[in-house]
Image (cartoon, rainbow, N blue to C red):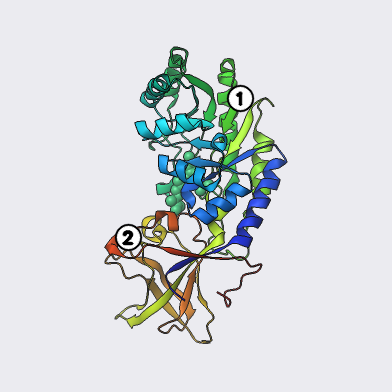
C-alpha cells in the first residue's frame, strides 16, 4: 500500500450524516457543514448529496462547495478577513448569508452590493466573550479572540444598518470554539443568544446561527464513532427561548467527518536514543499538523500486527522539526520496518490543513465503504 494516505470510511460518514440530520430535523434545525474541516471533493460531494448546507471561510471554499453540488442558497460565509473579490463572489452567486465580523466589512459589503446592484443578505457575528474551555488555540468566542463583534461594535453596527441600502440584515451568528465536549458551554451560548435576540427584538430577526464546535472522542474512537448529536441538539432545544419564526442553524465540522478518517503511515525505521525508542514513520506534520500545533492526541494502532511483545515508542515523522511528533511514550506492539500504523480520528482538520513543507508530496486519500471496518483489514 502507498503511504502516507488518508483512508476515509464512507459508510461511517453516511451514518454520521444521517444521525446528525435525524436529530436536527426533530427541531427543524438547519445544518451547514463547515468545509474547513475537510474539503476533499469526495467528502464534500457525499455531504452535499445528503442535503446539507455549507459553511465557508474563503472564496475558494465557496467555489469548492458549489462544484461539489451545494446549492448557493445553502451556503453561509464567515471570516474576519474577507477580501473584496471574495465578497463580490459571495454576493454575485447569491449565497444565503454573509456573517459579518467588523463594521468596516459591513460598509464594504454595502459598497460592493451597490456596485453589483444586488442586495447582500447578512448576519452579524457576535463575540459573546464566552470561554469554551478548550485548547487556547481553538477557542474563538472570548474578547481576546479576533472573531465577531464586541457589544460596543454591535451597537455601532446596528446604528449603521438603516443607512446601508444594499444590505439586508437577518440575524446573528455565533461560534464559540471547537472540540467542545462540555455541553454546559452550549447551554451558556443558548442563554446568551436568548438575551441578544430579546434585546434586539425590534430588528425583526429571522435567522440565528449557533456555529459548530461539538467535539469527538479522540481517546476511544471505536467506542464512539458517532458523536452524541441527540444530546447536543437537545441542549439547545431545551434552552433556546426564541420565536418560532426564527430559523436556527448550525455549522458542524469535526463532528461530521472527524471519526471517518484515519491517516495510514508506514514505519520506516525503528531507532533507539539513550532515552527513547523512536518509530520513524513516513507521515509527517505536513500531513497531519494537529499534534504539533495543538498538542492533540490521536489514538495510534498497528494494522495487522502479529507481535505479542509491547514496547514504548515516540512516533515521529520525517520533517526537520522536533514538533514533528505524533505521540510520545506510547505503548505499541513491538514495531518493525514496514509495519503500518493507523492514526485515528484524522478526518477533520487533517487533510485540509496539510501542506507541502519540506517539499514533500501532496497528501493522498483512499475511500472504503465498509461496516465495522477493522484495523486488520485496511
Ligand atoms: N463555524 C465557524 C465560524 C468556525 O470557525 C468553525 C471552526 C466551525 C464552524 C466548525 O467547528 P467544528 O464543528 O469543526 O468544531 N484546526 C482546529 C480547529 C479549528 C476550528 C476553526 N473553526 C483543530 O484541528 O482542532
Does residue 57 appear in the picture of this structure? yes
| In this view, the mark in front (2 or 1) | 2
**Mark seen at residue 123:** none
Above or below residue 266? Residue 80 is above
Rate crowding at label 1 as few (under 14), some (14 to 19) or many (20 or more) other CA atoms within 10 Å: some
- Quick check: is the Cβ at mark 1 less than 8 Å away from ligand 1? no
Of 187 and 125, which appears nearest the observer?
125
Picture residue at 52% right of the left edge, 77% below the top: 303
Picture residue at 56% right of the left edge, 20% below the top: 199
- Coordinates of residue 345 in the picture (x, y in percent): 52, 61
- Coordinates of residue 249 in the picture (x, y in percent): 60, 36
Picture residue at 45% right of the left edge, 54% below the top: 349
The quadrant the C terminus occupies is: bottom right
Question: Residue 233 occupies which quadrant of the picture?
Answer: top right
The residue identified by callout 1 is 206
How many numbered marks does the figure carry? 2
Q: Secondary structure at mark 1?
A: loop
Of 289 and 53, which appears nearest the observer?
53
- Coordinates of residue 36 in the picture (x, y in percent): 46, 48
**Mark seen at residue 356:** 2
Q: Give the spatial CA distance, label 2 vs label 1.
A: 43 Å
Give the farthest residue toward the right: 26
Of 85 and 153, which appears nearest the observer?
85
* Mark 2 and mark 1 residues within 8 Å of each other at the beta carbon: no
Does residue 128 appear in the picture of this structure? no
Above or below residue 241? Residue 367 is below
In screen coordinates, is 111 left or right of 203?
left
Q: Secondary structure at mark 2?
A: loop
In screen coordinates, is 11 left or right of 213?
right
- Coordinates of residue 82 in the picture (x, y in percent): 38, 34
Amino acid at each position: 500500500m502507498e503511504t502516507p494516505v488518508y483512508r476515509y470510511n464512507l459508510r461511517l460518514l453516511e451514518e454520521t450524516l444521517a444521525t446528525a440530520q435525524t436529530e436536527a430535523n426533530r427541531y427543524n434545525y438547519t445544518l451547514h457543514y463547515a468545509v474547513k474541516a475537510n474539503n476533499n471533493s469526495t467528502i464534500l460531494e457525499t455531504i452535499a448529496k445528503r442535503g446539507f448546507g455549507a459553511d465557508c471561510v474563503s472564496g475558494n471554499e465557496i467555489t469548492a462547495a458549489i462544484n461539489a453540488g451545494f446549492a448557493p442558497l445553502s451556503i453561509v460565509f464567515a471570516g474576519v478577513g474577507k477580501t473584496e473579490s471574495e465578497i463580490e463572489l459571495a454576493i454575485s452567486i447569491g449565497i444565503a448569508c454573509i456573517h459579518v465580523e467588523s463594521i468596516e466589512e459591513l460598509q464594504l459589503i454595502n459598497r460592493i452590493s451597490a456596485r453589483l446592484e444586488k442586495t447582500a443578505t447578512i448576519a452579524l457575528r457576535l463575540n459573546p466573550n464566552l470561554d469554551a474551555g478548550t485548547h487556547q488555540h481553538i477557542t474563538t468566542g472570548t474578547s481576546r479572540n479576533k472573531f465577531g463583534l464586541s457589544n460596543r461594535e454591535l451597537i455601532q453596527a446596528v446604528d449603521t444598518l438603516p443607512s446601508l441600502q444594499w444590505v439586508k440584515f437577518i440575524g446573528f451568528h455565533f461560534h464559540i470554539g471547537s472540540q467542545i465536549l462540555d455541553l454546559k458551554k452550549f447551554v451558556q451560548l443558548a442563554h446568551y443568544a436568548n438575551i441578544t435576540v430579546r434585546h434586539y427584538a425590534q430588528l425583526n430577526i429571522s435567522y440565528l446561527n449557533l456555529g459548530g464546535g461539538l467535539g469527538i472522542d479522540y481517546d476511544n474512537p471505536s467506542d464512539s464513532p458517532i458523536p452524541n448529536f441527540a444530546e447536543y441538539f437537545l441542549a439547545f432545544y431545551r434552552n433556546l427561548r426564541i420565536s418560532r419564526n426564527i430559523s436556527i442553524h448550525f455549522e458542524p465540522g469535526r463532528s461530521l467527518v472527524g471519526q471517518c478518517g484515519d491517516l495510514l503511515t508506514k514505519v520506516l525505521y525503528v531507532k533507539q536514543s539513550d532515552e527513547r525508542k523512536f518509530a520513524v514513520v513516513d507521515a509527517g506534520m505536513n500531513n497531519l499538523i494537529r499534534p504539533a500545533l495543538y498538542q492533540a492526541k490521536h489514538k495510534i494502532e498497528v494494522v495487522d500486527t502479529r507481535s505479542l511483545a509491547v514496547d514504548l515508542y515516540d512516533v515521529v515523522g520525517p520533517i526537520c522539526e522536533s514538533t514533528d511528533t505524533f505521540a510520545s511514550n506510547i505503548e505499541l506492539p513491538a514495531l518493525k520496518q514496514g509495519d503500518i500504523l493507523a492514526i485515528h480520528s484524522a478526518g477533520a482538520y487533517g487533510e485540509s490543513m496539510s501542506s507541502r513543507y519540506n517539499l514533500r508530496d501532496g497528501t493522498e486519500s483512499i475511500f472504503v465503504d465498509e461496516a465495522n471496518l477493522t484495523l486488520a483489514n485496511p
